[in-house]
Amino acid sequence: MVELRTLLCRLSEAFGPSGYEKAVRTIVREEIQGAVDRIDVDTMGNLIAFKAGAGAEPRLRVLLTAHMDEVGFMITQVKKDGMLSFKPVGGVDPRLLLGKRLVIGENRLAGIIGAPVPHLQRGEAANRVVDLDDMAIDIGAADEKGALGKVKVGDYATFATGFSVLCEDAGWPTVRGKAFDDRAGCAVLAALLKRERLPVDLFAVFTVQEEVGLRGARVAAHRVHPDAAFALEGTLCDDLPRPPDEDSTPVTRLGDGPALTLMDRSVVAHPGLMALLQESAAAEDISIQYKAPGLGGTESGVTHLAHAGVPSATVSVPCRYIHGPAAILNLNDLNATVQLMDATLRRITAQDLAR
Amino acid sequence: MQQLAKRLAEAFGVSGFEDEIRHVIREEIDGLADEVRVDALGNLIAFRKGRGGGKRIMFAAHMDQIGLMVSHVDEKGFMRFTNVGFVYALASWGGQVRFADGTIGAIGVDGRADPRHALPELRDYFIDVGAGSKAEVKQKVGSVDAFWPGFVAQGNIWFSPNLDDRAGCVALVQTLRQLKDAPIDHDLYAVFTTQEEVGLRGATAAGYALEPDLAIALDVTLTGDIPYASPAMEVGLGKGVAIKIQDSGMIGHPVLNARLIDLAEAEGIPYQLEVLQGGTTDARAIQVSRAGVPATALSVPSRHVHTPSQMVDQRDVEAAVRLLTAFLRRPIVL
């Protein structure tokens, strides 16, 4: 578990907004290169690791995707006063941004998203969410000239949150960090590759640009042309205190195990793969949960439409507060996701892919 | 044909869960194709080999229907749900639904929603199967259901929540029947597609796999013959098959459309020209498949689409079948 935690820590702290995943790719490569047979990087920056199966030929080709990119920001203008205008890269909630620490570029230039002084807020303005377009990043520069020495238009920024261990209890080992969507999936995938060879041919793709429209996975699925595909994700989790009279199911719950997607906005899970995941979980005594249907979308949305169609399913690690400056996950969920995928890929046959 | 319509309209097949309708159609087309297969997305692909010298033609009718998916079962056994495909919140209150196992439910509205003063949203509703507690409910998170009752005919008019697109499926099955023992030059792929209502997904995969020379989708379209139809639209119920000029997802291939119009004129088949301002069909996905496919759609006009009381006129379905059959019997130059 310590090994998995260290891996997640490394991945979480790497700088990798959509379109600028180089640093994450380097870490992934270092982590897995001894454990796979071949590594390629495609034109978009997807890292495609191949690990041949140990089973008899013909072997199934299974695609596993986890996206390296995280939500972030791009500098769009350096203003006269040295403040930086920006656009979000991927979906971020403006309500979470004011006063947050950022790092800009690979050199990790420090900045914060400027906020009006609370003492000076009056009336309606005090209750309004500031528009993204009215926010700016402050790097402490005296003016435009001072800022231009350090940054330029097109530079990326991400949240600056470091990784920390919140709870060491073996029954509830929680950690905090940024970019768990989807460095959690990357950690699961890297950990899976480090394990014993599976019966199937594995194409483990650490993808790019998921947060801006599933772009990396689209071309990766076309290139790999797999028999089946699984997206490994960090997904939303809202198991927070509720009003006492409210009877509802959270989207996912921390600590309840990997969350299987029945249907989201991008895909209806392949029934054979769902049954296989359920059977594998039951056989290995891994507790699973179902993500509340109808919400979000994952790379299965594009893999299942590749070529003439590919049976696809999504397995996720619940993460509270994803797409925000810091998220919380339970390492037991992360570990159980590795176990579940291992168990599933040891059982998968062509039979599971039939309709 | 009405019997076929009833059978297809009453079969269960919410997007992504098309097992029952696929099975029913498979029975109905038994013996009408040289080869029938099911692909990774569940599309039912019936291939009818031509005599040669013709085109490779794809006809697509989607067999999925819109529906609801359970997202939460509360302690009393009431089920909250999300939509599968586009469902009007407005048309859902008091509706009846049926699960794949036959369980019937009513759609009730949460007392906090105050529907007399504000339009409820889907989240304000629940499905009530008459259970006394959660323990009595067989359904769980992920169970899907569709609006019910399935089908009623009154003269030439069919009423059903599922005519989108079981009307198109009827037309495609009927076309295959017409072709029985009547050889044509063209290779025909009659595809009953899946997951159209959630994003033309089945047709995306099938269009890629089949790589046809041309494609025609069979679907329903809206009509402009209801009081104060907005936006205004020329298509009317019972006025013939509609030839797709344009919808919000595609522009019908002009040469294909000209061919269909000429044929309809020559054969005296009632037709109308369709410009639809909201919605699209499988033809859109096929049209942009690979390097592009000449594609259009033939539509059966339908009132009250995506509500529990869709209506079509059987004579429009018949016109579609006549036009498709006439189209297949002749050489095609694109």
Image (cartoon, coloured by chain):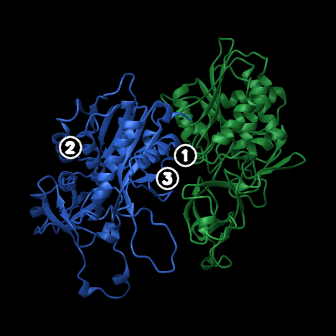
Callouts 3 and 2 in the same chain: yes
Q: Colour of chain B?
A: green
How far across and down, in percent of the image, does residue A130 sit?
33, 73
Q: Residue at x 73, y 32 (%)?
A: B27
Q: Quadrant of the C terminus of chain B?
A: top right
Q: Which mark is residue A265?
A: 3
- Which chain gets the blue colouring? A
Q: Is A331 above or below relative to B248?
A: below
- Mark 1 = which residue? B199
The circle drawn on residue A350 is: none
Task: Classify residue B270 by image quadrant.
Answer: top right
- Residue A216 visible, this angle: no
Q: Which residue is found at the position 26% from the left and 61% from the top?
A: A86
Taking depth in this image into account, of A264 and A102 the one nearest to the observer is A264
State the separation of the CA atoms marked 3 and 2: 29 Å
Q: Chain of mark 3?
A: A
User: Which kind of residue does numbered mark 2 sit on?
Assistant: Val
State the CA–CA distance, disc 1 to disc 2.
34 Å
* Amino acid on which the number 1 mark rests in the picture: Gly
Name the foreground residue: B330 vs A69: A69
The residue labelled by disc 2 is A28
Horizontal and vertical percent position of residue A306? 45, 35
| Residue A2 is at least partly visible in this image | yes
- Chain of the residue on which disc 1 is drawn: B
- Give the image quarter of residue A80: bottom left
Measuring 80% from the left and 40% from the top, which residue is drawn there? B316
